[in-house]
Amino acid sequence: MLYINYPSWIHPEIFPGIPFLGFLRWYSLMYIFAFGTAYLVLKKVAKEGALDTPKYKINDDDLLSFLSTGIIFLLIGARVFSALVYNTTNYYWKHPWLIFWPFDSNGNFTGLAGMSYHGGFIGGLIGMIVWCKVKKHSFWQWCDAMCTAIPLGYTFGRLGNFLNGELYGRITTMPWGIVFPGAEKFSTSLPWVQEFCAKIGMDISGMSLVNLPRHPSQLYEALFEGLVLFAIIWVCRNRKKFTGQLSLMYAGGYGLVRFFIEYFREPDADIGYRIAKDSAAPIYTNTSLLNISTGQILCFIMIAFAVVTSIILYKMQKNQK
């Protein structure tokens, strides 16, 4: 068989089947791991003197205050962006007071279902700007330190998506394709489905609907947007040419990698493509590189911002020497 079945023992809940512990989910735990990891890396960078100035030596209270402010703004931005941009029903535009309401209409606890990376990026950025303004610290200096820590923490977020069985990729015949339980099923009467299943050795006899293997795009993102990007920035942290370089390396690097991984990740079904060569193009497979998702548009903006701002900062700081 040229595919992998999603492990049956993985559930979104840490303790499945236990009612009073149902609110404990792997995704939430991954957020804790992410923030904890980011703090440890930030502390390591601070110990190297990256945040010290001739007049002030950074302490642990500064780091915790900075990180906590960034996290609060990040969560606000991630939730607001998800509710107002990615929710196509316009429900939250009409009921904005429910954006942070963690219960459904029946009173069941659901948590804050739906968080947007790009919203979190904007929110976290605003939080860092506010903190640095209040504390009178150099924004780009602190942002460089934070962006050294973010990718490694981000890795846990995408692992949380995998454990939730969500944000999976498009269908694939690659041997590492995974059959995700919640993915869209296809009719076995379709010729292309029969041909696809024959190619990967999937037995569909007696079945009317079949769940096809997909790219584990969450793991692609955890690897390239997380571990690989972290390694690159970590190596460059003591070799930067101007203050702000690491921050813009992160923004541009993330945007570039995510832009290409989006070709393997399935867009949200209710949004589809924002720009499409063929408006009827299916989202479960990539038919054209000109079919552009919401995430790719936002990533392109990140790349453009990183390139333009890098040029401006480099020239400004070079002229000041």
Image (spheres, grey):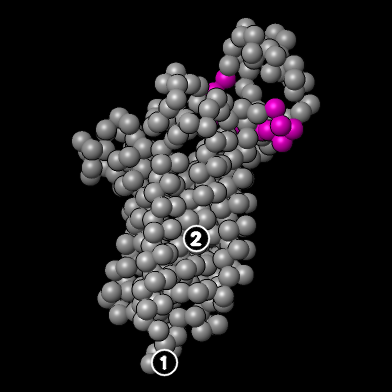
Q: Position of residue 25 (x, y in %)?
A: 52, 47
Residue at x 41%, y 52% (from the top left corner): 304
Q: Main secondary structure of the magenta part?
A: loop
Helix, strand or loop at label 1? It is: loop
- Image quadrant occupied by the N terminus: top right
Residue 179 at x, y percent in the picture: 65, 29
Q: Front-most of 9 and 223?
A: 223
Q: Is residue 136 visible?
A: yes
Counting from the top left corner in percent of width and height, residue 96 is at: 23, 42
Task: Work out whether residue 177 or residue 304 is closer to the camera in this orientation and state it.
Answer: 304
* Residue range highlighted in magenta: 173-185
Image quarter (top left, top right, bottom left or bottom right) of the C terminus = bottom left
Residue 183 is covered by the magenta coloring: yes
Marking on residue 250 = 2
Taking the spot 33% from the left edge, 54% from the top edge, the residue there is 76
Indicate left or right for 79 with 288 as reference.
Answer: left
- The residue depicted at 62 percent of the width and 57 percent of the height is 228
| 210 to 159, vertically: above or below | above
What's the amino acid at mark 1? Pro
Q: Could you tell me if the residues under marks 2 and 1 are in contact, i.e. CB atoms within 8 Å? A: no
Q: Secondary structure at mark 2?
A: helix
Mark pair 2, 1: CA separation: 27 Å
Q: Which mark is residue 54?
A: 1
Residue type indicated by callout 2: Tyr
User: Image point 71% across, 32% down: which residue?
Assistant: 174
Instruction: Count residues near mark 1 (Cα–Cα under 10 Å), then give few for <14, some for 14-19, many for 20+.
Output: few
